[in-house]
Image (cartoon, rainbow, N blue to C red):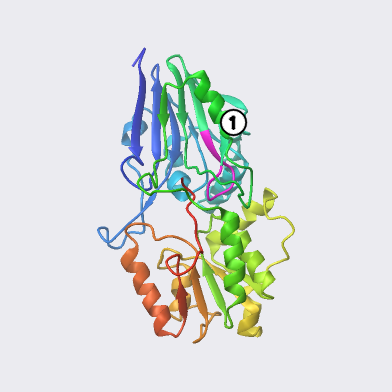
Amino acid sequence: MTNQLLFVPLGGVGEIGMNVYLYGLDDRWMMVDLGLTFADDRLPGADIVLPDLSFIEERKDELDGIVVTHAHEDHIGAIPHLWARLGCPIYCSRFPAAVLRRKLAENGIRHPAAIHEKKPGESFEVGPFRCRFLHVTHSIPDANALAIDTPFGRIMHTGDWKLDPAPMIGERTDAEGLEAFGDAGVLALVADSTNVLAPGTSGSETEVRDSLIELIAAQSGRVVLTTFASNIARLRSAMEAGRAAGREVVVIGRSMHRMLDAAEECGLLGDLPPLLDERDAKDLPPERLMLLVTGSQGEPRAALMRIAFDSHPRIKLEPGDTAIFSSKIIPGNERTLYNLHNQLVERGVEVITEEDHFVHVSGHP
């Protein structure tokens, strides 16, 4: 492989999810992201799908590290399951590091020395590759594009990104830094193309917050809001909307608690009032309560599915309550989610989605 620069995608190209990319130079390899995807009806009984790493496992002594662009499951979700097979260093920024440590610990893996935190703008080397993060806005904190310098030229690997003039959390995309790299010359752009066929631009997270404040204030019963557990800005928006409506906020779901704990560790939640424990939720009248729950994609063991089918030990819904799906439907989950919507409606719960109200914006362009 001498005098060759190689790009080998093991997932994430031509599909949504399971992002795994290899860059090769002089018989050395660098991996960018190691994600999973969610199983659909073609794989009954399976919840997730992991990438096939046999190509790089056969060359793991040549793998110098994994660089993580951000902490979404389709970019880091396979690390707790597959990292032990590779055993290489992991490079990422602060919030992905906080999330990864928790996920690895849950899987019985405690190797904090394997995770190397890097700041945007800081140069670091992964084998023959010289790398630098540039901050980008996305639907999760601390997302980064990756500049990769090689003897052949610079590669710009964007990760997931959007241009949001008023993100709820974090800084705006470093457009000046990207422009400077472009002016200096780029050999190849490996770019997120989600929404490429959709006209216009994505809305701002701040606009969603304002819409949620108005929407939740108009509800009379319990409000159950579900979104992606990793969307810290959306969770903060929902909390602010609940407080503005005079409601106590309860968070239900392990993955949501994990993400909020990591966000608090990184100082991303600001001065929000403390959350109410779900054990105390039953003592509040419906109009004083808002629940933030996992299960926006109809995951069978998530909180919302158990609540909808009345199998949650503490939370019971009643006619007049409202369920807000502050998320999009990931392709392949349509049938599961429509069944969940129907179950809620049969129980007298009003269901509000992005088709009914401005409750979601994409984290992509």
Spot occupied by residue 343 in the image (x, y as percentages of width and height): 39, 79
Give the residue number, with chain letter if any, for mark 1.
Answer: 176
Secondary structure at badge 1 equals helix
Does the magenta run of residues contain 143? yes
Q: Is residue 124 above or below residue 351?
A: above
**Residue type highlighted by circle 1:** Glu
Residue 126 visible:
no
Is 22 placed left or right of 103 in the picture? left
Q: Residue at x 38, y 49 (%)?
A: 198
Spot occupied by residue 248 in the image (x, y as percentages of width and height): 67, 74
The one of 299 and 238 positioned closer to us in this rendering: 238
Q: Is residue 9 above or below residue 27?
A: below
The one of 24 and 101 positioned closer to us in this rendering: 24
Does the magenta run of residues contain 87? no
The magenta segment: 137-145
Q: Residue at x 39, y 45 (%)?
A: 194
In the displayed image of the protein, which residue is found farthest to the front?
Answer: 200
Residue 266 visible:
yes
